[in-house]
Image (tube, rainbow, N blue to C red):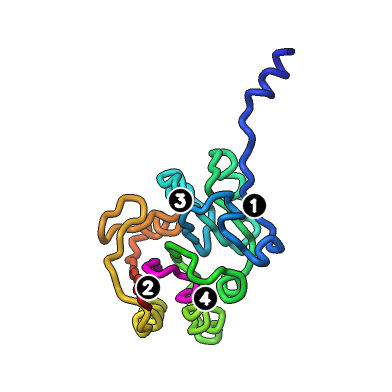
């Protein structure tokens, strides 16, 4: 065997990370990941800094990221492949549609939504992710005892989100913990959070849990 051939043999196979939207029909998490481990979903992965840290720290869990912006999606896929992360799948699709139509019911252990676009102009409010229909779908997709964590720097949007979530009998507020360290009150260090910290912005955080009987 030549030196170049031996080098090629030693190269690790890049993990399959990207998922085509068509593959989400009749979605089965265990089939998608090849194992029945608990699934955490992040909506709006951006450059996937948070998802990368979270997945590497929890190899016994599966992570599914949803991103609409094509350039961020491609960056995130390449980033996961370069790091050799095998417990992550990423898809470029509409998150609200995924939650309402494609996500298996009572299947998500943790739903992460960090810095969703606040669409601050009143005429754009209908574009916001957090609407009653989205919360209905999120509650249905959370496993019993599953958690939903939200972080934003936009106070008006936060109050809307808080009202939508805490009005649900199936949900109860729990301490917001840094998903990486488990420290109460800590942030999640998304790219947005790092940027906004430098700008001196404040953050608003909320975590809820679906009641085991809800």
Identify the secondary structure beneath mark 4.
loop
- Magenta highlight range: 138-153
* Image point (47%, 50%), residue name: 49
- The residue tagged 3 is 61
Q: Position of residue 209 (x, y in %)?
A: 35, 70
- Mark 1 neighbour density, 10 Å: few (under 14) some (14–19) many (20 or more): some
Q: CA distance from mark 2 to mark 1?
A: 29 Å
Q: Is residue 74 left or right of residue 128?
A: right
Residue 32 visible at all? yes
- Mark 4 or 3, nearer chain start: 3
Q: Position of residue 170 (x, y in %)?
A: 37, 80
Q: Is residue 208 left or right of residue 119?
A: left
Residue 210 numbered mark, or none = 2
For the residues carrying marks 4 and 2, which lies nearer the camera in this image? Answer: 2
Between 57 and 24, the residue placed more toward the observer is: 24
Q: Position of residue 116 (x, y in %)?
A: 48, 69
Identify the secondary structure beneath mark 1.
strand
Residue 18 numbered mark, or none = 1
- Mark 3 neighbour density, 10 Å: few (under 14) some (14–19) many (20 or more): some
- Mark 1 or 3, nearer chain start: 1
Q: CA distance from mark 1 to mark 4?
A: 23 Å
Quadrant of the rendering where the C terminus is positioned: bottom left
- Mark 2 or 1, nearer chain start: 1
């Amino acid at each position: 065997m030549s030196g170049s051939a031996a080098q090629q043999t030693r190269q690790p196979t890049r993990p399959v990370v990207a998922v085509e939207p068509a593959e989400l029909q009749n979605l089965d998490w265990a089939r998608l990941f090849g194992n029945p481990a608990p699934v955490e979903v992040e909506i709006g992965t951006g450059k996937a800094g948070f998802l990368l840290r979270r997945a590497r720290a929890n190899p016994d869990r599966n992570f599914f990221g949803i991103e609409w912006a094509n350039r961020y999606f491609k960056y995130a896929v390449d980033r996961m492949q370069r790091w050799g992360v095998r417990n992550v799948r990423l898809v470029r699709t509409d998150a609200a549609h995924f939650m309402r139509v494609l996500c298996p019911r009572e299947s998500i252990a943790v739903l992460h939504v960090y810095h969703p676009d606040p669409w601050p102009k009143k005429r754009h409010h209908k574009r916001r992710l957090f609407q009653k229909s989205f919360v209905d779908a999120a509650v249905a997709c959370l496993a019993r005892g599953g958690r939903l964590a939200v972080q934003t720097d936009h106070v008006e949007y936060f109050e809307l989100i808080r009202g939508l979530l805490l009005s649900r009998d199936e949900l109860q507020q729990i301490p917001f913990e840094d998903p990486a360290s488990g420290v109460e009150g800590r942030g999640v260090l998304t790219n947005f959070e790092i940027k906004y910290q430098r700008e001196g912005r404040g953050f608003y955080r909320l975590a809820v849990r679906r009641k085991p009987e809800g």
